[in-house]
Amino acid sequence: MRRILLLSAVLMVLSGCVTETEFSSVSKESAADFQSFDFDGNGIVDAYSYISNTYSPEGTSVTLQRTVLASAERESSGISFENISFTNAQEIKMEYNNLVESSQEEFDVCSSKLGLQNVQCPDENTCVKICSSYSPVCRRVSEDYPDILGPSILSFQKNKIDSVNKIDSMKNKIFSVEMLSPAQLEDLADDLVDLKNSITALYTNPLYLVEGPAICTYSETPLKILDQMSEKIAGISTIDKEYEYTVLIRIQNKDNKQSYEDIFVKDVVPAEYTSGSLYSTQNIKIEGDAVFWDAVRPYGDETRYAVYTFKSSTPPQDIAWNKASVKIKSLDLSILAFSFSVFDFFIISGDYYLSLSMAVLLPAVIFVVIINILLFAFFYLRAKLEKKSQYRAVKDFVGVTNPNWRKDIIFGAVLFLVGSGLSFFTAVTDGELVIPNAINYILTDYVGLISTFCIVFGGVTVYLGLQSKIKEMLLQSTYRVTIQEDKEAALSNLADLKEKSAELKKFIDELSKEEFDISDAYRVYTSIPLKKINTLAEKKDTSENVEVMKLLNMVENAVELLKEKKENAEQSWQSWENYISKQLEDKEDLYVSTLITIPSSLRLWAVNRYIQKHLEEGLALEGELIRKKTLSPEAMTAALIKEGLIKGAVVLKDSKPVLSLLSAGSKNITTALTIKLISYLKTFLKKRNQKEYKYLMGIGNSNAFILVKSGETESLILCEKGKFKEAFERWKQTLKRF
């Protein structure tokens, strides 16, 4: 079964073909519409809008369309003053009051439509949530234009606050206008120009000017009042300083229902922009004049937008926009055409999750059936080539039979029925299978998720139960035919059983010496009637071959399980060794039962192995208790030499030798050389005004040495090059116990 699952997983991964295109070539856009807006009706254009024709990058099903809004930011180029009469001053003050009222009314009307009349939102997601919960119109806009609404509300809120602050800041100047000096009047004139720029920027917003997300309508009243005030204060001439551009690129991909596509958009700013002004609330990367977006995924009728803003001194009418380019990474799911057909068949019932589950279950079952057929063909052909019996091919194909197939069928059927029942209580009415949408439904609908799981898992469990029964019947049928044709197959089973039993016994004996847990394998071994098996083999009696087959399967499973258990223990040994070492820190004894991260059946094995590998620690196992015995430095060092971890060690205390042990060679010469080496090292460091050494290591072709200083204790150990790291770590631990 594991072979089938592994092969199935590989084929499922390879079933979708992943392709990636390069960014499409760039050419000029053509304009579908270009408008100018005079918000106050004074004959001077305040803003522009540009809409391109829809286009598809070459070789893709993606359609793009650009919308650009541009507001003019002006500055005064000339101011001529006249004496402000008492009457003009009173009129300016009245007009200021009218400006306050009209602008507040204008701002409040739009704010109320957005649900922001008495609140401010800190980010675009909060803005969208507040707006959607307040207004059905805003909820529709958030569903159709999710990428535009949040940034547009934030921009409106920023320009509204900016405009209100500028109106408030000029109040004192207005109410003392007749007493202002020429310089103060010039400042006031500049303030009026700045305020008009803020209100113009507020109106040049998708919420006002773009069909679809346009929730608000602008009023010319505040700007007209500003013009009247400006005329009474001074003759002001203005020029366009720069333009603030808002770029919206619509992205649609309606022909991708049987593929999973990531679309990467790249746009190039066609004019030199003000440094630091290129900005987006979306995840973008800027490289020079190129803007790159993270992957966007529009599916079906969904529309996505790439949005950014920038400022430039180039007028909108002088800009020729290049087409945005796209790069597509797609996973072709056309190989799942059968799943789509199954879904279309079952969706007639109107039950989405049942249809989705069957679209997963039936192809999966058919796929596993095909894999089984291929595996059977493989084993059958191999048996023929190796001149083995048909029974051997079937036995290799069937493997270990499942005796609980009846329980599996009943359990799977119950799960399937529960899942089918739950699917009737779900609310999804989608009549079409779109992979991304299906994933989204499952992840957001817990009842649908449970229903789908129960149907699919239950159906698979029923199938596997039936498969086990069929394999068992096939094995028995093949055996009955084969036993009549070739008695050697049964005798082969006897020989295999004897061989496997001997292998199991050998494995048990080996692991018993390590005190490894062999209880399950030993129970299997003791259940084998070896005397009877030997008698049957001697007499070539095949009358009990069915029993022999069961015993053989049982022994083979026991060998595999014991090997797997030992392999897993070996893989975990390093972490267990570190764990035991940490538990023994600062403790004189430790109960084996407290080693909770090690499986209980393997604790004694792990502890005994640790004791053997750490003889220098002087550990002993007394029943369930690990005790530390007091060892002399000589004994601890000798333990490391006996273990083969080091070849020898020399220890100096206050520059005098206190210990010298070697596996071979002269202790006196080695000690003398060590003292000489330390003396040279200290002289070398002193001449160079260096601090005392901590470690000195030397590695040759086959051997290595390590010089370690710890307080007044200095030591040198010799070891093989391949054991350098472990020897160093163990020697440091040993020094702590000296």
Image (spheres, rainbow, N blue to C red):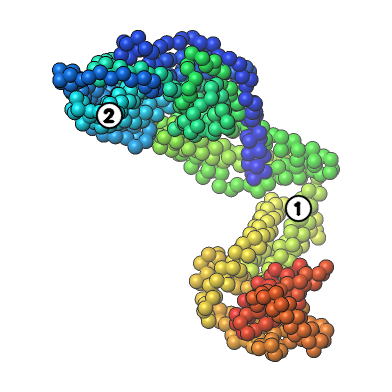
**Figure quadrant of residue 266:** top right
Mark yes or no: residue 468 visible: yes
Q: Which mark is residue 493?
A: 1
In the structure shown, which secondary structural element does the residue marked by tag 2 occupy?
A: helix
The quarter of the rendered structure image containing the N terminus is: top right
Judge left or right: residue 318 versus residue 335: left
Judge left or right: residue 648 versus residue 729: right
Q: Which residue is mark 2?
A: 184
Q: In this rendered view, identify the residue nearer to me: 731 or 465.
A: 731
Q: Which mark is residue 3?
A: none
Type of amino acid at the residue the image marks with label 1: Asn
The quarter of the rendered structure image containing the C terminus is: bottom right
**Figure quadrant of residue 568:** bottom right
Type of amino acid at the residue the image marks with label 2: Gln
Q: In this rendered view, identify the residue nearer to me: 681 or 430.
A: 681
Q: Residue at 55% of width from left, 37% of height from top?
A: 460
Judge left or right: residue 5 versus residue 135: right
Q: Position of residue 25 (x, y in %)?
A: 63, 20
